[in-house]
Amino acid sequence: MKLSLEKRQTLTNLWLVGPATLAMVLFIFLPVAIVAVLSFTDYQFGAKTFNWSWLDNYIKLFSSSIGRRAITNTLIYVAVVIPFSVGFGLLVAMGLFRMGSWAPRFSNVLKTVYFLPIASTLVAMSVAWQMLLHPSLGLINQVLVAFGAEPHNWLSDRGLVLYTLSMIGVWSSVGYNMILFLAGLAAIPSELYDAAEVDGAGSSWSRFWTVTWPMLGPTTLFVMVITATNAFRVFETVATMTRGGPAFASDTLVYALYREGFVYFKAGYASAITMVFFAFLLMLTLLQFWVIEKRVHYK
Amino acid sequence: MKPTFISRIISSSFLVAGAAVILLPFVWMLSLAFKPRDEIFSTSIQLLPSRLEWSNFIFALTETNIPLFLWNGTVVVLGILVFQVMFAVPCAYALTQRRFLARKLIFGLVMIALMVPFHVTAIPIFLGFAQVGILNTYWALILPFIPTAFGIFLFRQFFAQLPSDLFDAARVDGLSETAIVWRIAFPLALPAATAFAIFSVTTHWNDLFWPMIATTDPNLATPPRGILYFRDEESGDNVGPLMAAAFIVTAPLVILFLMAQRKFIQGLASGGIKG
């Protein structure tokens, strides 16, 4: 059978693009539609039928203390991780960038060290953190006691646990931000610093405020949004070290979605949690696209 | 030159102190993995072991399922990567080097798909897999990750830079489009493929979320899932082997990172545009 040229071209296109498109529809678009519909039902995994419950799941999420806890915890976690991770990332990048001019080897070694948490398995490292923070056998409390300070239950104190997890979140993301800032610093033309010096900005303090900071502005925004997007998905450290406890003090959106959906099998309620999580991330992603656009215009 | 010297000393000490904090969990993990039992369960400060105790590593490698977890991780990670490339590369090629009606639409779908985090799709995929009856198989761990909007996006950017004359010449020589994709376009895109491979392998080797959902069979556990099985079985009693196991699980990627740092950083940093 001979096909016309046009038909053959169409078949070729279908053969090249079809599998990927079909897979996207099957594993991304269809599930998103289903999860949106499920969030308005009381469906439970394994049940034969379901009832429409309309906004009940959302009302439950926003009005129950456990649901609200998951949302506020996630927001607090993100709000703590962003300034520390971005701030330290910037400081480390500026330090290493300057060190690169007089001790490039050492600067590179330190860069490797700071990036190490990103290359390692977070669950394995969480198990190590758990031992480091162990109430009696952990190094951190042992050192505190040696200096006469109070030891803390870092992971089982309700008031403390979320901040402990946030600091581990900073630990695991600072190297990534450092890399992004290093790229931003390398892109600043050195003539700008010379010009600033001529204009009387001699100290490193004033050079930072007149050149580095304004030139890094778009990078900083980009880094902040990326840090927020990643922090919103916090799951591994929670699942490994606290399981959302004690008493939901470290419960987060993704962990709550896992627990309600796959431990308690409340598919409808877990779908509502998913949709709220998705809404937060969509806002951030749109912000990210806008920031990328802006960054391109700067160049 | 004195002020510069002093400021160098100050900034270097801060950088070294920060690096020490970053290294702390790695040092403690290795230290516990090498410590004899009595030193692990001592409450006095001892940063490093007094002698190297290899038995923890031997225990982790022979008395536990860690080797099986490493094998599962390898199968899953390579399975995902191979399928991702098989699906994404032809699609990205067609989106850049061929003209057809649905091209803009499909690229739009790719951009929208970029915005969907995997967590959002977990519940329906779990439901579907339960219907089909493939939960607790390697397929359950591999299939959901085959469509990679990020991969298509990355390869598309690379292919867009290649001159279309190159492909026209190949067509004149009588090569089929499939042959052009795999014998000309893909080899040229090897830098992009390496960056993507590093991103994909790291992401899925380290993933805990989906393996916790899709499998309940410990024999199918990937390394992070397996570590947790091991820890929960031992209930805090076997710290030395647990730390040895944690080290063994994280070592392959760390070694790869130390060997190919620039590629690695490039690969993981490119993931930044992924939503």
Image (tube, coloured by chain):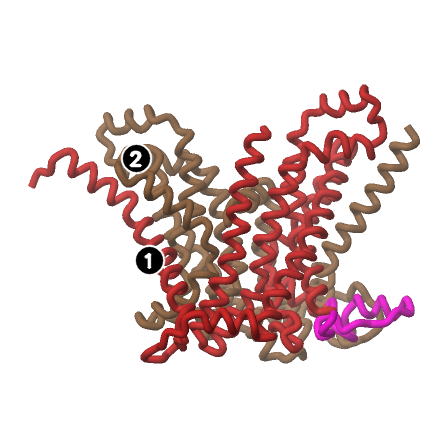
Chain colours: A red, B brown
Q: Which mark is residue B180?
A: 2
| Main secondary structure along the magenta-highlighted residues | loop
**Residue B249 screen position, x and y as percent:** 58, 62
Q: Badge 2: few (under 14), some or many (20 or more) residues near its Cα, within 10 Å? A: some
Magenta-drawn stretch contains A112: no
Circle 2: element type: helix
Can residue A144 be spotted in the picture? yes
| Residues at discs 1 and 2 in contact (Cβ within 8 Å) | no
* Residue mark closest to the camera, 1 vs 2: 1
Q: Quadrant of residue B241?
A: bottom right
- Considering depth in this image, is A37 or A241 the residue closer to the camera? A37
Circle 1: element type: helix
For the point 60% across and 45% down, the residue is: B259
**Residue A106 screen position, x and y as percent:** 75, 40
- Considering depth in this image, is B31 or B129 the residue closer to the camera? B129
The amino acid type of the residue labelled 1 equals: Leu
For the point 71% across and 61% down, the residue is: B25
Q: Which mark is residue A26?
A: 1
Residue extent of the magenta highlight: A132-159
Q: Quick check: A229 above or below A236?
A: above
Task: Tell me the chain of label 2.
Answer: B
Task: Tell me the chain of label 1.
Answer: A
**Residue B78 screen position, x and y as percent:** 43, 55
Q: Quadrant of residue A218?
A: top right
Can residue B62 be spotted in the picture? no
For the point 38% across and 66% down, the residue is: A37
